[in-house]
Image (tube, rainbow, N blue to C red):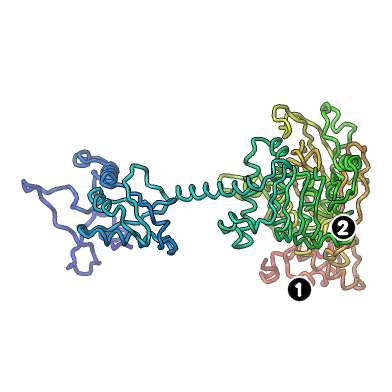
Amino acid sequence: MAPPNGPRGGSSGPRSSPRTSTARGGGISKRRSTARTDRDGDVSMAPAAGSAPTGPSARGSGRSRASRAPRSSRLSQNIRNHIADKTTLKILGLKSSKAVNNKDGGLRNLLDFIERKSKDKNIVLSRGIIDGDYVWIKVNKEDAPVIMRLNGFTYAGASLTIEETNEPMPTAASKVSREAAETKAKLLSVLSSRYNDVGKILDLSALGADPILGNLGTFDSQSLAQKSFRALVHLVGSEYRSPEEKREAIPAVSLARNDITDVDQVFTLAYSLPHLRRLDLTGNKLDNFSALSKWKHEFRHLEELHLTGNPVTTQPNYVAEIMSWFPSLQILDGQQVRTPAEAAEAMRAANPQPIPEFPSNLRDGDAGIAGAFIGAFFDLYDRDRAALASQFYDMESTFSLTAPDNNSRDHSWRAYTQYSRNLQKLGPRNQLGVDRLYVGGPQIAQVWTKLPVTRHPPLSEGDAWLVDCHTFNGLADPTNSSLPAMGLMINIHASFEEADAAHNHFGVRKFSRNFILGPSMPGAPHPYRVISDQLTLHGWKPQAVASVAAPVAAPVAAPAAVPVAAATSVPVVAPAAPVIAPVIAPVIAPVPTQISPGAASIDDATKAQMIQELSRLTGMTSEYSQLCLSGAADWNWDMALKSFEELKAALPAEAFSAS
């Protein structure tokens, strides 16, 4: 902090003159420069050299300020003059010298060599840059002829060629861009050499033995290998002008003998080439169905699959399981498993008809699409949310969650608030609401796995569901951008049982959910997809449970077909292998609100539940909740609540939980 040099704080009088270093009782003051005078002896108001301007001239007024060029103009002119005094030299030969294996590619040693050989002038070279086969340096124009005399000299076993150039000096960014272009060209050459134009097969087998990829260092680590594969697959997709052209050019891919242990390592193939009809995974290390599960329900047009040489082929029900994942599959490991007619029938069963156009007053019409979708959706949401996301959500689908902004001691919303968007709270400084719009099936599935397990009522309980839906026009059609497509909006109001074991909350929660359905992308599992999914949570009612049941492993049988018209049903293929199925503990009656006085016969488990519930509602600690219930209330719930309301103002701070 600067020392004071004016009146003491609180003084309203005129500003006193600066203290000198000899003033008694004064603080330390800045050393003052002697006033300068001009030729006539007048005091000069211009600032001393190196000092900042003060007074009116500092604010842009005054004759001396107007007579000088702006600082930025002088700086720009100095830069231009500095550049004009420089010239650019290109030096060829470093790449073929023995110094090329040095840590910096031999650049510093080369510059030191040039400095030493320029004996008649003391030349010091600034840092250069290696770009391609050349070393580029900037030198003073007067030094350039001296350096040019070294043209033809031998350096580290290589002859140097030095030339002056008017080309712009490359930058680090341009160097990276050029290296990226060179890498891209090499990867394209790999793809070109591995494409069989006659059979239209892209052979990506045994990539680890490819000499070009080996020289690029793409297999120095597993992460680099996966990044290189993603780059290769991306290039495959980017080289074609349209999806139709790509689908026609590459119907088959081989990934044989790549030591693949999980298809997650090569998952991007399903996004870049979803239309594949033939896929070869021979000779990899896929051990079980889990290693293949991420491609479940992908490649909807796959007709031929080879997994020979993978341990997964020894799994029980191997053929039936793979057939259920790929309904169009006809040949597995060289054996016919379906006829073309059977494959076509399986595809029709797996793909309901697209949403038809109805007049607005017909709502969902007679097709029953909304009922089929709701039945399939909530069944899978309760059992297998990852499978649900992969079936009805694509990379453009969105999901948002809204939960009340509850600032009380009620923690029943804790599992949802960290993901809640709460649009009504959005403002210029609320970035959280913007970030909490989840886009794409994988991201949506990831958020769903962190929410409590649920159990929705069956659709047969008509009183438990309020559903409204209608069709509307104007959506973009992914298959034909020139024509508008039909959409279907579904609004649902219902409730579900919830088990939040992480926070020990069990109860029933009301919700609203709004879906917008539209046509799917080509090759999707269903002809329609979820474009937007908005979940709004309402009231929560606690339920006492006999025991806290954690999710247990249990085989899940295939669900019965949704009872709607066959042409529009949404069949859901359930995993044949055991999966993790959340099981909510049986719900018993809520905590009784009318218990007769003298209820000493209440069992300990019920008392513990009452204590826990009272603590949740009031914020009191368990000890004070027990005192409130077991005192004059004698375990009467209404009396205990009434007693708390009457006495809460007099309760000490330690009666309440710190949380």
Q: Quadrant of residue 605?
A: bottom right
Q: Quadrant of the N terminus?
A: bottom left
The reply to whether residue 582 is in sight is no
Q: Secondary structure at mark 1?
A: helix
Residue 498 is situated, as x and y percent measured from the top left of the image, at 82, 57
Q: Is residue 553 left or right of residue 534?
A: right
Binning the other alpha carbons within 10 Å of mark 1 as few (below 14), some (14 to 19) or many (20 upward) gives few
Vertical order, 483 against 211 (above or below): above
**Residue at 40% of width from left, 61% of height from top?**
106
Q: Is residue 214 left or right of residue 197?
A: left
372 vs 622, nearest the viewer: 372
* Label number found at residue 491: none
Closest to the camera, between mark 2 and mark 1, is 2
Q: Quadrant of the C terminus?
A: bottom right
Q: For the residue marked with disc 1, what is the amino acid?
A: Glu
Tell which circle, 2 or 1, labels the residue nearer the N-terminal end: 2
Residue sticking out furthest to the left: 40
Report the number of discs.
2
Residue 175 is situated, as x and y percent measured from the top left of the image, at 45, 50
| Cα–Cα span, label 2 and label 1 | 57 Å
Q: Quadrant of residue 196?
A: top right
**Residue at 52% of width from left, 46% of height from top?**
181
| Residue pointed to by mark 1 | 623
Residue 545 is situated, as x and y percent measured from the top left of the image, at 87, 64
Q: Is residue 493 left or right of residue 397?
A: right
73 vs 584, nearest the viewer: 73
Residue 552 is situated, as x and y percent measured from the top left of the image, at 85, 64
Binning the other alpha carbons within 10 Å of mark 2 as few (below 14), some (14 to 19) or many (20 upward) gives few
Q: For the residue marked with disc 2, what is the amino acid?
A: Tyr
203 vs 328, nearest the viewer: 203
* Label number found at residue 318: 2
